[in-house]
Image: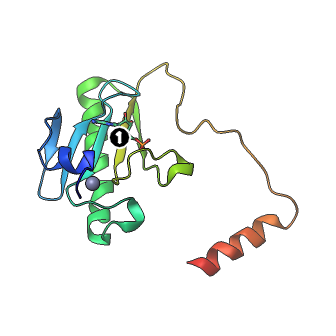
Amino acid sequence: MDNCIFCMIANGQIPSTSVYEDEDFKVVFDIAPAAKGHLLILPKSHADNVCDLPEETAAKIMPLAAKLGSAQMKALGAKGFNIVVNTGEAAGQTVMHCHTHVIPRYEGEAPIVANWAQGSYADGEAASVAQAIVKAL
Ligand code: AMP
Ligand code: ZN
């Protein structure tokens, strides 16, 4: 897609620091890392978000993310990693070309992803919310 920064990076029209590439993806450093070694998995074909990604491409992302996270732990001494796919502006997606963050986490750091305030449901609310989701699937 014209004027898409991640299309240009994924297809080599803009230089990047890359750690992996195959026919479907380029994996690059995030320009403003949440932690040392923060990676972005960029599909080479444009899709606005994960919902628009062909299923066969989407299915390759999780194994790749796991491989990259394992390499972050082995090479950088990370003790864990977060795999994050922000989808839609409300979820914090700022670049509208599907991308998967692989963020290494180091000992002594506070969690940065799973640190949301824990909510609760009113009586019966969980069942009706579940029903609405089931209907929409
Ligand atoms: P998100 O908020 O999930 O859309 O994440 C977008 C990410 O892309 C942010 O973490 C940015 O730091 C990163 N980013 C934006 N522009 C670039 C760029 N030119 N090269 C590498 N990473 C970028
Ligand atoms: Zn794009």
- Front residue of this view, candidates 37 and 80: 37
Position of the N terminus by quadrant:
bottom left
Please, is residue 76 above or below residue 94 in the view?
Answer: above
**Quadrant position of residue 28:** top left
Q: How many marks?
A: 1
Residue ID at (32%, 71%) = 55
Give percent across and percent down for residue 76. Answer: 27, 24
SS of the residue under disc 1: strand
Which residue has dot 1 on it? 102
**Quadrant position of residue 13:** top left
Residue ID at (79%, 51%) = 120
As drawn, which residue projects farthest toward the bottom? 135
- Front residue of this view, candidates 110 and 47: 47
Image quadrant of ligand 2 equals bottom left
Position of the C terminus by quadrant:
bottom right
Give percent across and percent down for residue 118. Answer: 72, 43
Residue ID at (42%, 66%) = 51
Relative to 92, 45 lies left or right: left
As drawn, which residue projects farthest toward the front? 3
**Quadrant position of residue 132:** bottom right
Please, is residue 96 above or below residue 27 in the view?
Answer: below
Give percent across and percent down for residue 124. Answer: 85, 67
